[in-house]
Amino acid sequence: MSKLKSAKDCNHERKGQKTKDNKSLHLFRFQFANFLIENNLPFSLSSRLGAFINNLAQNYDLRQLSSFSVDRKCISEIATNFLGPYFQEKYLEILKYTPFSLALDEGSLKDNTQYLAISAKHLESKASFFTTTKLISLIQLEGSKTGKTIFKLLELLLFTGEDGELRKKMFMGVCTDGATNMISTGNASLTSQLEEILPHMIYVYDFFSYIQSYSERLYQ
């Protein structure tokens, strides 16, 4: 009789623990959803972020995770010095074997640092008709920002050496805004320079940049 009572008590304790675990899990899911919403993160990130959290829980000690801290400067250094070069090399390798186009955009940071963002759109795979867009490089522009200067930076990054010759065959065209260093009459613009080595390329004007520029002039 005592053994039966002991078994029932154990079973009751297991059910109680299971109920407690379920409540904790529901609370965690609520906090997880709240984190996505508060930080304006897409819900499509849920599965990958959840898998990342599971991976952390399985591979790191709880004491390590509880003392973990990181700031913007740390993430920036990791991205610039480690992840940036890794992903750039990875994507440049892909562009040797799949048709691609480029999107170029000049901009500036809060400290007035000028940069050129270079993105590539290419097929996800040889068997797919779907495309994907990746940021290839973020180049700081120092001094001259002429079309010829930007062309030399682009040529050095994509179109030099044996690998560059392969990418030339895959290159389809470029999309950029209407800045004079990007497109202009004569041979001083970036597109003119590109056409000299890539006569098959197609140039596409960024219509949204035109609308933004026109709107800014309208409100002045």
Image (cartoon, rainbow, N blue to C red):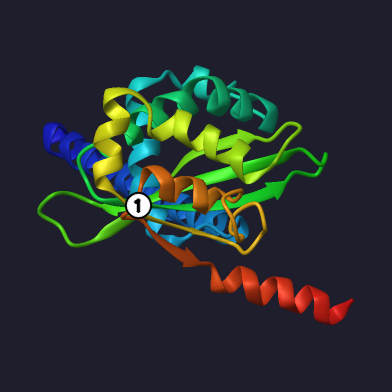
Residue farthest to the bottom, as pictured? 218
Residue farthest to the front, as pictured? 186
Vertical placement of 102 versus 96: above or below? Answer: below
Residue lying at 28% horizontally and 27% vertically, measured from the top left: 163
Residue sitting nearer the eye, 50 or 78: 78
Residue sitting nearer the eye, 99 or 12: 99
Q: Report which quarter residue 72 is drawn in.
A: top right
Residue at numbered disc 1: 199
Vertical placement of 31 versus 129: above or below? Answer: above
Residue 18 falls left or right of residue 148: left
**Amino acid on which the number 1 mark rests in the picture:** Pro
- Residue 169, percent across and down? 24, 43
Vertical placement of 67 versus 22: above or below? Answer: above
Residue 53 falls left or right of residue 180: left
* Residue 93 visible in image: no
- Residue 216, percent across and down? 79, 73
Residue lying at 22% horizontally and 46% vertically, measured from the top left: 98
Residue lying at 34% horizontally and 33% vertically, measured from the top left: 92
